[in-house]
Image (cartoon, rainbow, N blue to C red):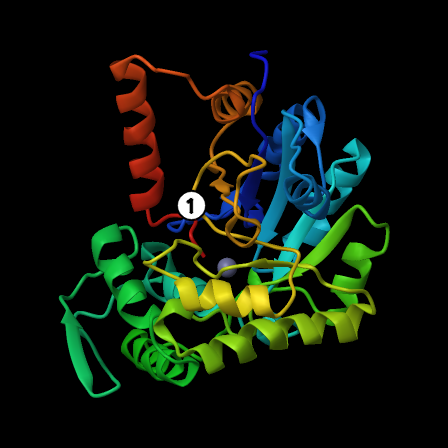
Amino acid sequence: MTPAAASVILCYHRVARLVSDPFHLAVPPELFAEHVAVIARHRPVALTALAAEVAGGDVPPGGVAVTFDDGYVDNLRAAKPLLEAAGVPATVFVTTGATGDPAPYWWDELEALLAPGGGPQPPRALELTVDGETRAWPPGATVSDRGTAFEVWAWLRTRAPQSIAAGMSQVRAWAGAEPALVADALRTMTVEELRELVESGTIACGAHTRTHPLLGAHPAAVQREEVGGSRDDLETWLGTPVATFAYPFGRRVIEYRGSSVRVVRSLGFACAVTTDPGPVTARSPLHELPRHVVPVDLDGPAFERWLAERLAPPPGSPPLRRLAKRVRRDLRERLTPAGRL
Ligand SMILES: [Zn+2]
């Protein structure tokens, strides 16, 4: 194992085996078990503890903080037992407006409606009119055609919740589907399940807004309501302080902006995490800690190599080839839409 120089925060979403996973959100349970075994051989650290190290100006190397976004029920059913058995702490960021809602997230429903496995595609164009704007996608648009699917997703996600709901009802009408009839495995946790998730102390909950908006597209007052509201919900439900926040989608400028950071800081969070990749050091900004979204298809040895690369010492004066490789990798991580929810 290469000696570690940095610490990192990992971002997962789901631990599940899905038939179709176009957003690359789900790590199959048997692979996640291998990831946990690798993490346990490094320095597993709770996110709040890592943030305290950053605040104290001393981050020992090799720290790995595990996080999950969005609060899917498989975090409780599949991830928690593995994490507890290995003594690996984790933080689950919860969209509190989705808590206890049997309906899935709109992007999961979009996938279910557009996926090729979901039945024949209607032979007509998918035409959506939202907020006075109209756009059409040609017949045969499917999620397997990532370009089109991500266009629909990207076109909707900047909007207010009621506008996204309006768009989704038009997608449903186009597909001839009932509203939000989706398997139990796609749903998020209930309040009772969140309590069960945190009861042993291995897993903590963090805030992730109420409706998962693209924060940067909304005024500061709306952002404050979303961010502070989700923390209030969790503190009421769990009876413990909630000190951490994850920006929905998570990339600076594209998906949140300076006003979002000011809102989060002013609400007194100990730290907040992004999905911009990078190492955590004593110089990392506490309210914009970088996170690596973990690729969903790595087995144990591949994950170990992937992790070692991210924990490796930053080269003092790297040969150009290595620098170019690092820049290419970072660009690829920033540009891949997968996993940024
Ligand atoms: Zn999210």
The residue sitting at 74% across, 54% down in the picture is 204
Q: Quadrant of the C terminus?
A: bottom left
Residue 289's place in the image compared with 136, above or below, is above
Question: Where does residue 60 sit, x and y in percent of width and height?
Answer: 67, 27
Asked whether 108 or 86 is in front, the reply is: 86
One can see residue 102 in this view: no
Q: Residue furthest right?
A: 200
Residue 58's place in the image compared with 240, above or below, is above
Snapshot quadrant of residue 70: bottom right
Question: Where does residue 106 sit, x and y in percent of width and height?
Answer: 44, 70
Question: Where does residue 7 sit, x and y in percent of width and height?
Answer: 59, 31
Snapshot quadrant of residue 43: top right
Q: Residue furthest bottom?
A: 132
Q: Left or right: where does residue 280 sit relative to residue 167?
A: right
Which residue corresponds to mark 1? 276
Give the residue type that dot 1 points to.
Asp
Asked whether 179 or 164 is in front, the reply is: 164
The residue sitting at 50% across, 60% down in the picture is 247
The residue sitting at 55% across, 80% down in the picture is 225
The residue sitting at 21% across, 53% down in the picture is 147
Q: Residue furthest front?
A: 57
Q: Tell me: is circle 1 under 8 Å from ligand 1.
A: no
